[in-house]
Amino acid sequence: QVQLVESGGGLVQAGGSLRLSCAASGRTFTVETMGWFRQAPGKEREFVARIRWITGGTYYADSVKGRFIISRDSVKDTLYLQMNSLKPEDTAVYYCAAGNILRYDYWGQGTQVTVSS
């Protein structure tokens, strides 16, 4: 099992920045990929970004490309999401997830991000 705990959410004005963290514990050596997802009220959960844990290769949703940066600290087993130039439409609960290239098996509890206009 892998446990994931997100932190760093909050309220920010449009154009501002936030950095989310996701601390992983447990059988982290089984994790090949970690990602961020988000779910806005009344909408389905959507993919935001992912990172391959060993190689550091990244992939982003078009909606956040150029504004968000996903990174990891493999010593601390921590995933990050640096969010810049935030927009009101970025308002959502953000979740981190861990797994392999086929699926995400583990999910955090989520952290709320609210962007005011």
Image: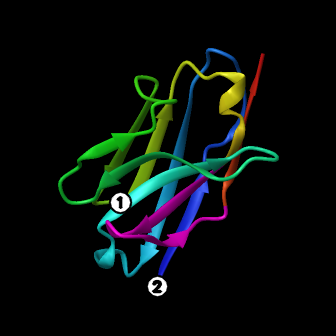
Report x, y in % for residue 29: 29, 76
Q: Earlier in the sequence, mark 2 or mark 1?
A: 2
Which residues lie in the magenta part? 94-109
- Name the mark on residue 11: none
Residue type beneath disc 1:
Lys
> For residue 11, what is the image quadrant?
top right
Q: Secondary structure at mark 1?
A: loop
Examine the structure image and report whether residue 106 is included in the region drawn in magenta: yes
- Name the mark on residue 76: 1
Report x, y in % for residue 103: 42, 70
Q: Nearer the viewer, residue 35 or 44?
A: 44
Q: Nearer the viewer, residue 40 or 54?
A: 40
Q: Which residue is mark 2?
A: 1
Note whether 81 is above or below 30 in the view shown. Answer: above
x 50%, y 56%: residue: 22
Note whether 46 is above or below 11 in the view shown. Answer: below
Report x, y in % for residue 53: 27, 59
**Label 1: few (<14), some or many (≥20) within 10 Å?**
few
Q: CA distance from mark 2 to mark 1?
A: 17 Å
